[in-house]
Image: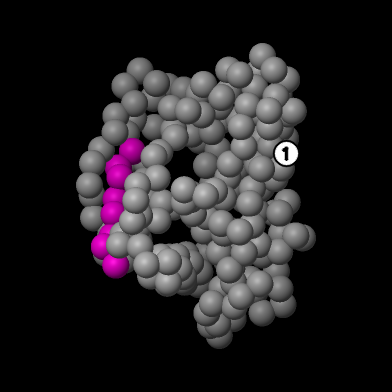
Amino acid sequence: METNRTTSDFVINHGLRPEHRAPAARGYWRAFATKLRYPLGPEAKAVAFIEGVLDPDYAISALSDTGAFLGVAGFRSHSGSFIGGDIKDLAAVYGWVGGTLRGVLVSVLERKVEDGTLLMDGIFVEPEARGRGVGTALLHAIEDHAVSAKLQRIRLDVIDINPRARSLYEREGFRERSVMSLGILSRIFGFSHATEMTKRI
């Protein structure tokens, strides 16, 4: 695992340690449960699915100076993504009927990977690590990775019920590109619209 950045009390690493798959899956669910509650809930099955399909090669993680998991930033490219999976993976957890229905709902949230763009695939910080600059450090590491991959921009999406995250992205130079409204589907996903934000690098 390649060390990217070191601070006074945490380290940013490329990848995800095997022992951190479970806490990363739980943290991902906790961070995105509002919009994933119907596509992937209940919680136990959602966490099992996420843990089974996450790919450490598309993650940058934050660790304490003692090695404890503090958070992760996932990304997506044409070759793979942090949280992947297909209908077979869904069926393995929810059965074929439940997996198929959930696959249809998940497809509503799918985003196309554009050439020259690193697509963020979720970022979160564990509750006990918030306020220490971990989220900002993860974003900086994502930017470093995009630069090393010779990409031109980073893209992420932030939902309307998460203004704190949007403020962080704006401080880091991300700008609004477009807004997607869910319309009647907002009752299913728990938010009304998602804003696409990009940053040129």
Is 117 drawn above or below residue 64 in the view shown? above
Q: Which residue ends up furthest to the bottom in the rendered image?
A: 8
The x and y percentages for residue 182 are 34, 26
Residue at x 68%, y 28% (from the top left corner): 88
> Considering depth in this image, is 57 or 41 the residue closer to the camera?
57
Write down the region rendered in magenta: 194-201
The chosen color scheme is one colour
Q: Which residue is mark 1?
A: 48
Residue at x 61%, y 19% (from the top left corner): 100
Q: Quadrant of the C terminus?
A: bottom left
Q: Inspect the magenta stretch and tell me whether residue 110 lies in it.
A: no
Q: Is 201 on the left or on the right of 60, as rendered?
A: left
Label 1 neighbourhood size at 10 Å, few (<14), some (14-19), many (20+)? some
Residue at x 52%, y 55% (from the top left corner): 74
Is 187 drawn above or below residue 150 in the view shown? above
Q: Quadrant of the N terminus?
A: bottom right
> Considering depth in this image, is 153 or 17 the residue closer to the camera?
153
Give the SS element for disc 1: helix
Is 117 drawn above or below residue 133 in the view shown? above
> Considering depth in this image, is 198 or 79 the residue closer to the camera?
79
Q: Inspect the magenta stretch and tell me whether residue 197 lies in it.
A: yes
The x and y percentages for residue 187 are 42, 22
Can residue 37 be seen in the rendering of this structure?
yes
Q: Which residue ends up furthest to the right in the rendered image?
A: 19
The x and y percentages for residue 32 are 52, 42
